[in-house]
Amino acid sequence: MTNIASAIRELHEELPSNVKLVAVSKFHPAEAVMEAYRAGQRIFGESRPQELYAKARELPDDIVWHFIGHLQTNKLKLVLPYVSMVESVDSLHLLEAIDRWGRDNGRITDILLEMHIASETTKQGFSKEELMSAVSLAASCPNVRVSGLMGMATFTDDEDVIRKDFAKLVAARDEIRAGAGLYPGLPVDFGVLSFGMTHDYRIAVGMGADIVRIGTLIFGERTY
Ligand SMILES: *Cc1c(COP(=O)(O)O)cnc(C)c1O
């Protein structure tokens, strides 16, 4: 068995059945995706539009693609026809563009709003205040289905820092749910949380992640 296949099998055994595994295949070739696919993995995450587009057209149709990277509005047509979810909606401008694309193409796109929870300022995402406006706008967009929130913790070995970051995401989700009346159009099952990567997914699972996004542990180091 290849390393990729055994990593997939071990993760499928380890993760609770209600947690979705997104295998993050960015920067890895289609053949690596196929190794994971043959081991039973079906959900894959990509962060670059052109790469997602090429892989989605080449690889089996029953692969479920999640887009997890920064998305520019001029790249929507490379991404939206192929993905079942955009996890990384990080601006109102992008939200509106996805809604408009959906109206013009007869599609409702499932999205997560990305919240900035890390201490690094380089990471993307809405601040807590901006997030509440984004939820409000997303709930009113007919061609967008806002399912929940995504976040990335500070890159550190300090578990307390990671837990505090993740806790912000959980708290924001709970607050939005509690105030659902403020957001007409919000799906009744709003609340999916995507958090946890190779170095912190166990913490994430313990804190109630619904989706974990794991790349390096499955595919090895990326060469940029
Ligand atoms: C690259 C990436 C991941 C996967 O990171 P690993 O540390 O390789 O598991 C998860 N989420 C996002 C948004 C990413 O860009």
Image (spheres, rainbow, N blue to C red):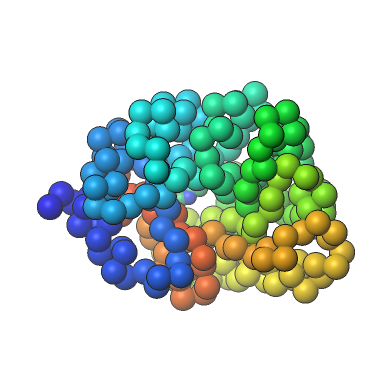
State whether residue 103 appears in this view: yes
Dividing the picture into quadrants, the one containing residue 178 is bottom right
Q: Is residue 178 positioned above or below 219 on the image? A: below
Tell me residue 137's x, y (percent).
81, 48
Closer to the camera, 105 or 17? 105
Tell me: 162 left or right of 167.
left
Look at 65% across and 24% down and name the residue there: 74
The image shows residue 69 at horizontal and vertical percentages of: 53, 40
Check the image and report above or below for 129 versus 189: above
Q: Choose between 213 and 103: the one closer to the eye.
A: 103
Q: Residue at x 60, y 63 (%)?
A: 192
In this view, the residue farthest toward the front is 106
**Image quarter in which the C terminus is found:** top left
Which residue is outermost to the left?
Answer: 1
Q: Is residue 28 above or below residue 167?
A: above
- Can residue 88 be seen in the rendering of this structure? no
Q: Please tell me which residue is depicted at 38% across the width and 57% down the height of the picture.
A: 198
| Horizontal arrangement in the rendering, residue 200 relative to residue 139 (left or right) | left
